[in-house]
Image (cartoon, rainbow, N blue to C red):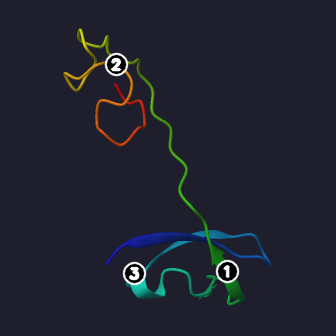
Amino acid sequence: MPVYEFRCSTCHAVFDERRPMADADAPATCPGGHLGARRLFPVFATTGHAAEPAPGGFCGAPVGGGCGSGCACC
């Protein structure tokens, strides 16, 4: 079962709770006993740099939409 992070709207306590994915968005009770804590959405950051594209793009196709979906990934 996944662990979700919640924040109480009354006392502002932040806590974790293990629960099924089907109940992920259901309100929780904080350690202080207040009902109505809401789930927080995780925030993360990645760092790095883009790789140099190979001639013809990453996909080996002409630059601009190499995956075929028109997203210009290459």
Q: Position of residue 31 (x, y in %)?
A: 61, 82
**Marked residue nearer the N-terminal end (1 or 3):** 3
Q: Mark 2 or mark 3: which is in front?
A: 2
Q: In which quarter of the image is residue 68?
A: top left
Identify the mark at residue 37; answer none if there is no mark. 1
Identify the mark at residue 62; answer none if there is no mark. none
State whether residue 73 is above or below residue 52: below
Relative to 19, is 5 on the left or the right?
A: right
State whether residue 27 is above or below residue 60: below
Identify the mark at residue 21; answer none if there is no mark. 3
Q: Position of residue 50 (x, y in %)?
A: 38, 18
Pointer 2: what residue? 63
> Is residue 19 visible in this depiction of the protein?
no
- Looking at the image, the residue that sits furthest to the right is 10
Question: Disc 2 and disc 3: Cα gap in Å?
Answer: 40 Å
Q: Where is residue 39 in the image (x, y as percent from the top left)?
A: 60, 73
